[in-house]
Image (cartoon, rainbow, N blue to C red):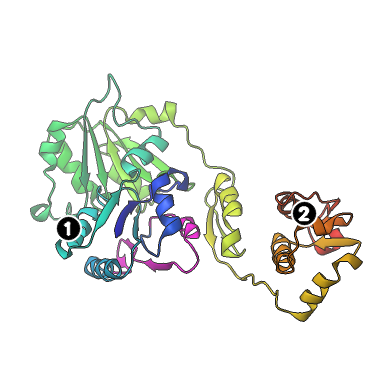
Amino acid sequence: MVYLTGAGPGDPSLITTGALELLRTAEVVLYDRLADPGFLLETPSGCILIDVGKSTGDHTRSQDEINALLLDYGRRYDRVVRLKGGDPFLFGRGGEEAEVLANAGIPFSVVPGVSALLAATAYAGIPITHRGHASSVGVATGHGARGKDGDPVRWRELARGVDTVVVFMGVGALETITGELMAGGMLPDLPAAVIERGATPRQRVITATLTTIADRIREENVNPPALFVCGPSVPLADRIGWYHPGPLAGLTIGVTRPAAQSKSFADRLRSLGAQPVMMPTIAVRHTLDRPDVHASMEQLAAFDTIAFSSVNGVDSFFAALERTGRDSRALAGKTLAAIGPATAESLKSRGLKADIEAATFIGEGLL
């Protein structure tokens, strides 16, 4: 079974519970560049992770290659997740991939995601519909807009048919797009905006008019991914723009912790506006089979104090203790020391209270 799954836009909190459930039980994940890399930490150990992301001028895999991978893994595995930024059926090529799977007789399911159409505009404070301002919305792709003959979008008809126009992937051809919209009847002074990296800590909202927005984004050096919006409700961004990234906005911070222990720290960085990048430099392995570990467990009654120097140490200790057929009752009467609050919390989860907790979370502090 292949699951064509939307990961939502930049803010990882907008992924659906259904998508998270799939990631946590996936055997294979083929993921896009726009999907938050933190989602990969949700996958089980041994899951096959394949980067098939595409960006302007840089395609890790062609669409034909992606289709071939879906067919290959879809035939060999029961839970294949095709993880896409936004929603798979809104400019996500999910429809094309669904056709390929259907033609090959491979079962698939579609898990919708929150699209940038809704999320980026909401985070910018631009309601795409608003009673008294806008009652209709038109959504288009900017791909093909440079060469009018091959452009799949009838811009002039769109301009006459809706109040708000939203364009994906249109930054590179914005001058052509705005010119066509004005030729279709939209007024030159109609409010317009470009939302760069919407719903992320690096979000920027550039506002202008239909006739000046292309010049403004050049001045501001706006780059994809970005969403173009024009319509009478755009000025509301000045009044109801609510999203303000934290003090670390604009920073990319490498998280070197083991992959399985990075999530809480990465979430904290995101809450402060940073973009965490998972780059584990160590891996944790239990050493339960060493003779000295076995000897320590056998002589546990001889120790008055047991010092835990990490959450990993707590996990390893109790794994070794269980091998001897005992549990936390074997620690009755002993003094327990923890290097910091996370380690103390790990003990607490096992029904044990740390008698000593270091004020500074290093070995010398514990000493």
Residue 292 versus residue 222 in the image, above or below? below
Task: Examine the rendered structure and indicate whether residue 59 appears above or below residue 236.
Answer: below
Start and end of the magenta stretch? 34-61
Task: State yes or no: residue 49 in magenta.
Answer: yes
Along the horizontal axis of the image, is 35 left or right of 318?
Answer: left
Image coordinates of residue 124 in percent, x first then y, are 40, 36
Residue visible at 64% across and 70% down in the picture: 284
For residue 270, the mark is: none
Identify residue type, mark 2. Gly
Q: Position of residue 350 (x, y in %)?
A: 72, 52
Q: Residues within 10 Å of mark 1 (few under 14, many from 20)?
A: few
The amino acid pointed to by label 1 is: Glu
Q: Percent from the top left, x then y, of residue 265?
A: 61, 53
Where disc 2 sits, the SS reads loop
Q: CA distance from mark 1 to mark 2?
A: 53 Å
Q: Give whichever of 53, 57 is nearer the camera.
A: 53
Compared to 295, does 300 lie above or below? Answer: above
Disc 2 crowd, CA 10 A, few/some/many (<14, 14-19, 20+)? many
Which residue is disc 2 drawn over? 340
Residue located beneath label 1 in the image: 99
